[in-house]
Amino acid sequence: MALDVAWAVDWVRESARTVVEHRDELVELDRQIGDGDHGENLKRGFTAVVGKLDALAEPPAAVGDVLKLVATTLMSTVGGAAGPLYGTAYLRAAKATAVPALDPAGVVALVEAALDGVVARGKATTGEKTMVDAWSPAAEAAAASAAAGGDPVAVLTAAAHAAAEGADSTVPLVATKGRASYLGERSAGHLDPGARSTQLLLEAAVVAAGRAS
Protein backbone atom coordinates (compact mmCIF):
# COMPACT_ATOMS: atom_id res chain seq x y z
CA MET A 1 0.00 0.00 0.00
CA ALA A 2 1.04 3.60 -0.51
CA LEU A 3 1.03 6.19 2.24
CA ASP A 4 -1.31 8.94 1.11
CA VAL A 5 -2.54 12.34 2.24
CA ALA A 6 -5.02 10.80 4.70
CA TRP A 7 -2.10 8.96 6.30
CA ALA A 8 -0.07 12.17 6.50
CA VAL A 9 -2.95 13.96 8.22
CA ASP A 10 -3.39 11.06 10.65
CA TRP A 11 0.38 11.10 11.30
CA VAL A 12 0.13 14.72 12.37
CA ARG A 13 -2.80 14.01 14.68
CA GLU A 14 -1.02 10.97 16.15
CA SER A 15 2.12 13.09 16.61
CA ALA A 16 0.10 15.65 18.56
CA ARG A 17 -1.39 12.90 20.71
CA THR A 18 1.97 11.30 21.47
CA VAL A 19 3.79 14.55 22.31
CA VAL A 20 1.00 15.35 24.78
CA GLU A 21 1.33 11.84 26.26
CA HIS A 22 5.12 12.16 26.53
CA ARG A 23 5.23 15.87 27.39
CA ASP A 24 6.45 15.34 30.96
CA GLU A 25 9.06 12.77 29.91
CA LEU A 26 10.50 15.14 27.30
CA VAL A 27 10.49 18.03 29.77
CA GLU A 28 12.41 15.92 32.29
CA LEU A 29 14.93 14.70 29.70
CA ASP A 30 15.52 18.28 28.59
CA ARG A 31 15.74 19.49 32.19
CA GLN A 32 18.61 17.07 32.80
CA ILE A 33 20.84 18.40 29.99
CA GLY A 34 19.06 21.42 28.54
CA ASP A 35 16.56 24.12 29.48
CA GLY A 36 13.58 21.84 30.17
CA ASP A 37 11.15 23.16 27.58
CA HIS A 38 11.29 20.52 24.83
CA GLY A 39 8.12 18.69 25.80
CA GLU A 40 6.06 21.84 26.29
CA ASN A 41 7.37 23.36 23.06
CA LEU A 42 6.42 20.32 20.99
CA LYS A 43 3.03 20.06 22.69
CA ARG A 44 2.30 23.70 21.84
CA GLY A 45 3.55 23.31 18.29
CA PHE A 46 1.65 20.18 17.33
CA THR A 47 -1.50 21.39 19.05
CA ALA A 48 -1.30 24.45 16.80
CA VAL A 49 -0.76 22.26 13.73
CA VAL A 50 -3.89 20.24 14.48
CA GLY A 51 -5.82 23.48 14.89
CA LYS A 52 -4.71 24.61 11.45
CA LEU A 53 -5.60 21.24 9.92
CA ASP A 54 -9.07 21.48 11.41
CA ALA A 55 -9.49 24.96 9.92
CA LEU A 56 -8.58 24.02 6.34
CA ALA A 57 -11.38 24.71 3.86
CA GLU A 58 -10.24 21.85 1.62
CA PRO A 59 -8.11 18.75 2.28
CA PRO A 60 -4.46 18.97 1.18
CA ALA A 61 -3.72 17.61 -2.30
CA ALA A 62 -0.27 16.17 -1.58
CA VAL A 63 1.61 14.62 1.32
CA GLY A 64 4.04 17.51 1.06
CA ASP A 65 1.23 20.01 1.63
CA VAL A 66 0.57 18.45 5.03
CA LEU A 67 4.25 18.45 5.95
CA LYS A 68 4.64 22.07 4.84
CA LEU A 69 1.80 23.05 7.17
CA VAL A 70 3.66 21.30 9.99
CA ALA A 71 6.89 23.07 9.08
CA THR A 72 5.50 26.59 8.95
CA THR A 73 3.47 26.14 12.11
CA LEU A 74 6.34 24.70 14.16
CA MET A 75 8.62 27.50 12.98
CA SER A 76 6.12 30.13 14.13
CA THR A 77 5.01 28.56 17.42
CA VAL A 78 7.96 26.58 18.84
CA GLY A 79 10.80 28.40 20.54
CA GLY A 80 14.32 27.31 21.33
CA ALA A 81 16.22 25.05 18.98
CA ALA A 82 13.38 22.60 18.33
CA GLY A 83 11.26 24.96 16.23
CA PRO A 84 13.91 25.78 13.61
CA LEU A 85 15.28 22.22 13.58
CA TYR A 86 11.97 20.42 13.18
CA GLY A 87 10.62 23.20 10.97
CA THR A 88 13.52 22.79 8.55
CA ALA A 89 13.23 18.99 8.70
CA TYR A 90 9.53 19.06 7.79
CA LEU A 91 10.06 21.74 5.15
CA ARG A 92 12.75 19.69 3.39
CA ALA A 93 10.54 16.60 3.72
CA ALA A 94 7.61 18.53 2.23
CA LYS A 95 9.61 19.43 -0.86
CA ALA A 96 10.55 15.77 -1.31
CA THR A 97 6.95 14.53 -1.02
CA ALA A 98 4.92 16.78 -3.33
CA VAL A 99 2.83 13.82 -4.48
CA PRO A 100 -0.58 12.39 -3.49
CA ALA A 101 0.96 9.20 -2.05
CA LEU A 102 4.35 7.74 -1.17
CA ASP A 103 5.81 4.53 -2.55
CA PRO A 104 8.86 2.97 -0.84
CA ALA A 105 11.24 5.41 -2.55
CA GLY A 106 9.01 8.25 -1.44
CA VAL A 107 9.25 7.20 2.21
CA VAL A 108 13.04 7.07 1.87
CA ALA A 109 13.02 10.52 0.32
CA LEU A 110 10.92 11.88 3.20
CA VAL A 111 13.25 10.56 5.91
CA GLU A 112 16.45 11.50 4.06
CA ALA A 113 15.16 15.02 3.40
CA ALA A 114 14.21 15.46 7.06
CA LEU A 115 17.71 14.35 8.06
CA ASP A 116 19.23 16.79 5.56
CA GLY A 117 17.14 19.58 7.07
CA VAL A 118 18.25 18.84 10.62
CA VAL A 119 21.90 18.62 9.56
CA ALA A 120 21.69 21.83 7.55
CA ARG A 121 20.05 23.78 10.38
CA GLY A 122 21.95 22.30 13.32
CA LYS A 123 25.36 21.82 11.70
CA ALA A 124 25.61 18.53 13.59
CA THR A 125 26.72 15.04 12.68
CA THR A 126 26.32 11.64 14.29
CA GLY A 127 27.91 11.01 17.68
CA GLU A 128 27.31 14.54 19.00
CA LYS A 129 24.26 13.58 21.12
CA THR A 130 21.59 15.31 19.05
CA MET A 131 18.50 14.33 17.07
CA VAL A 132 20.84 13.53 14.16
CA ASP A 133 21.74 10.36 16.06
CA ALA A 134 18.13 9.21 15.56
CA TRP A 135 17.44 10.64 12.07
CA SER A 136 20.65 9.31 10.51
CA PRO A 137 20.15 5.59 11.29
CA ALA A 138 16.47 6.02 10.40
CA ALA A 139 17.43 7.22 6.92
CA GLU A 140 19.94 4.40 6.49
CA ALA A 141 17.42 1.77 7.60
CA ALA A 142 14.72 3.17 5.33
CA ALA A 143 17.02 3.02 2.31
CA ALA A 144 18.08 -0.53 3.16
CA SER A 145 14.49 -1.68 3.58
CA ALA A 146 13.44 -0.16 0.26
CA ALA A 147 16.43 -1.72 -1.49
CA ALA A 148 15.40 -5.10 -0.05
CA GLY A 149 11.92 -4.75 -1.54
CA GLY A 150 10.05 -3.48 1.50
CA ASP A 151 6.66 -1.85 1.01
CA PRO A 152 6.07 1.73 2.27
CA VAL A 153 4.92 0.58 5.72
CA ALA A 154 7.90 -1.76 6.08
CA VAL A 155 10.27 1.05 5.08
CA LEU A 156 8.67 3.41 7.58
CA THR A 157 8.74 0.76 10.31
CA ALA A 158 12.44 0.10 9.69
CA ALA A 159 13.11 3.82 10.01
CA ALA A 160 11.24 4.05 13.31
CA HIS A 161 13.03 1.03 14.79
CA ALA A 162 16.40 2.45 13.80
CA ALA A 163 15.46 5.84 15.28
CA ALA A 164 14.67 4.13 18.58
CA GLU A 165 18.05 2.40 18.60
CA GLY A 166 19.71 5.65 17.60
CA ALA A 167 18.01 7.52 20.43
CA ASP A 168 19.16 4.88 22.93
CA SER A 169 22.71 5.24 21.59
CA THR A 170 22.81 8.86 22.78
CA VAL A 171 22.74 7.86 26.47
CA PRO A 172 26.51 7.21 26.91
CA LEU A 173 27.56 10.02 24.56
CA VAL A 174 29.13 13.28 25.69
CA ALA A 175 27.33 16.18 24.01
CA THR A 176 29.44 18.34 21.73
CA LYS A 177 26.58 20.34 20.17
CA GLY A 178 23.80 22.47 21.55
CA ARG A 179 23.01 23.48 25.11
CA ALA A 180 23.92 20.03 26.49
CA SER A 181 27.51 20.55 25.36
CA TYR A 182 27.89 23.13 28.16
CA LEU A 183 27.78 20.20 30.62
CA GLY A 184 30.73 18.42 29.02
CA GLU A 185 31.30 14.98 30.58
CA ARG A 186 28.27 15.45 32.84
CA SER A 187 26.02 15.14 29.77
CA ALA A 188 26.88 11.43 29.52
CA GLY A 189 24.32 9.06 30.99
CA HIS A 190 21.28 10.97 29.73
CA LEU A 191 18.99 10.29 26.78
CA ASP A 192 18.98 13.18 24.31
CA PRO A 193 15.48 14.72 24.27
CA GLY A 194 15.63 15.60 20.56
CA ALA A 195 16.59 12.06 19.62
CA ARG A 196 13.78 10.75 21.83
CA SER A 197 11.19 13.06 20.23
CA THR A 198 12.42 12.02 16.77
CA GLN A 199 11.79 8.41 17.76
CA LEU A 200 8.30 9.29 19.01
CA LEU A 201 7.36 11.16 15.82
CA LEU A 202 8.49 8.32 13.55
CA GLU A 203 6.67 5.80 15.73
CA ALA A 204 3.55 7.96 15.37
CA ALA A 205 3.96 7.69 11.60
CA VAL A 206 3.98 3.89 11.90
CA VAL A 207 0.88 3.90 14.11
CA ALA A 208 -0.94 6.02 11.52
CA ALA A 209 0.23 3.67 8.76
CA GLY A 210 -1.18 0.73 10.68
CA ARG A 211 -4.59 2.40 10.76
CA ALA A 212 -4.38 3.16 7.04
CA SER A 213 -3.56 -0.39 5.96
Image (cartoon, grey):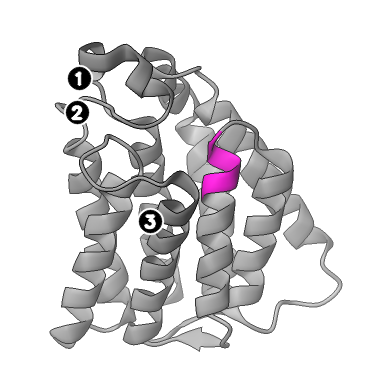
Query: Is tag 3's residue or tag 2's residue first in the polypeptide sequence?
Result: 2
Q: Image quadrant for the N terminus?
A: bottom left
* Residue located at (63% from left, 46% from top): 46
Q: How many residues crowd mark 1 within 10 Å: few (<14), some (14–19), many (20+)? A: some
* Residue located at (74% from left, 45% from top): 76
Span of residues in magenta: 81-85
Residue 83 in magenta? yes
* Closer to the eye: label 3 or 2: 2
> 79 or 60: which is nearer to us?
79
Amino acid carrying mark 2 in the image: Val
Q: Tell whether 84 sits left or right of 170.
A: right
Q: Residue 202 carries which label?
A: 3
| Separation (CA) of disc 2 from disc 1 | 6 Å
* Vertical position of residue 26 compared to residue 94: above or below: above
Name the residue that disc number 2 marks.
171
Amino acid carrying mark 3 in the image: Leu
Q: Which mark is residue 188?
A: 1
| Separation (CA) of disc 3 from disc 2 | 19 Å
Q: Does the rendering let one see residue 29?
A: no
- Do labels 2 and 1 touch, CB within 8 Å? yes
Query: Is tag 1's residue or tag 3's residue first in the polypeptide sequence?
Result: 1
> 161 or 120: which is nearer to us?
120
Q: Tell whether 189 sits left or right of 7.
A: left
* Vertical position of residue 193 compared to residue 162: above or below: above
Please state the horizontal and vertical placement of residue 18, each as a whole percent of the image.
48, 43
Element under label 1? loop
> 33 or 127: which is nearer to us?
127
* Closer to the eye: label 1 or 3: 1
Q: How many residues crowd mark 3 within 10 Å: few (<14), some (14–19), many (20+)? A: many
